[in-house]
């Protein structure tokens, strides 16, 4: 059984299709739960109007399945709290020139 850290490691490989940046560093992952043969992930998008939400959801599920071996992966888009740039990692903020 993978650990929560294993799942986060897998999630760290998933890139936002529009921005080409890791969704983990963007602060889009809100919750990861690992229960025996199941992984549940709550994530958000930078905007409700994001045109690649379905693509990102599929990529997230497939990457976690491939990296952890767990086939029962559920990713759910949530909107609360709304995403904002303060949720980004400090490293990504520095890379993009956003004040910390």
Image (cartoon, rainbow, N blue to C red):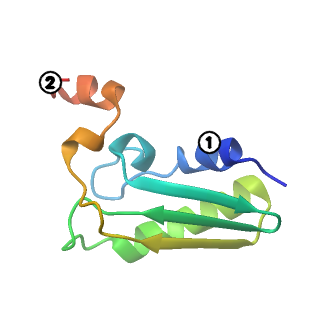
Is residue 1 rendered to the left or right of residue 24?
right
Question: Mark 2 highlights which residue?
Answer: 99
Q: Earlier in the sequence, mark 1 or mark 2?
A: 1
User: Going 44% across and 55% down the picture, which residue do you hit?
Assistant: 30
Which mark identifies residue 9? 1
For mark 1, does the 10 Å Cα neighbourhood hold few (<14), some (14 to 19), or many (20 or more) residues?
some
Number of disc labels: 2
Q: Quadrant of the N terminus?
A: bottom right
Residue at the image position 71 percent from the left and 59 percent from the top: 34
Residue closer to the observer: 53 or 34: 34
Image location (x, y in percent) of residue 15: 43, 51
- In which quarter of the view is residue 90 placed? top left
Please give left or right for residue 17 compared with residue 98 in the image. Answer: right
Residue 69, by quadrant, is: bottom right
Q: Is residue 62 left or right of residue 55?
A: right
Callout 2 secondary element: loop
* Residue at image point 53% right, 44% down: 12
Side of 38 where 63 appears, left or right: left
Compared with residue 59, is residue 72 higher up or lower down, i.e. above or below? below
Residue nearest the observer in this picture, 83 or 20:
83
Label 1, label 2: how far apart the Cα atoms are: 26 Å
Relative height, residue 39 to residue 12 (above, below): below
Residues at discs 1 and 2 in contact (Cβ within 8 Å): no
| Crowd class of label 2 (few under 14; some 14 to 19; many from 20; radius 10 Å) | few
Q: In the figure, 73 relative to 18: above or below? A: below
- The image position of residue 35, as x and y in percent, is 75, 64
- The image quadrant that residue 26 belongs to is top left
Which of the pair 85/95 is nearer the observer?
A: 85
* Element carrying mark 1: helix
Q: Position of residue 83 (x, y in %)?
A: 25, 55
At horizontal 75% and vertical 55% (from top left) the residue drawn is 68
Q: Which mark is residue 52?
A: none
């Amino acid at each position: 059984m993978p650990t929560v850290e294993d799942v986060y490691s897998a999630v760290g490989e998933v890139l936002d299709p529009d921005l080409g940046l890791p969704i983990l560093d963007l602060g889009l992952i809100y919750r990861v739960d690992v229960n025996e043969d199941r992984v549940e992930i709550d994530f958000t998008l930078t905007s409700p109007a994001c045109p690649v939400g379905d693509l990102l959801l599929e990529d997230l599920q497939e990457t976690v399945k491939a990296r952890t071996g767990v086939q029962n992966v559920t990713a759910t888009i949530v909107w609360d709290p709304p995403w904002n740039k303060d949720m980004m990692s400090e490293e990504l903020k520095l890379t993009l020139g956003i004040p910390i």
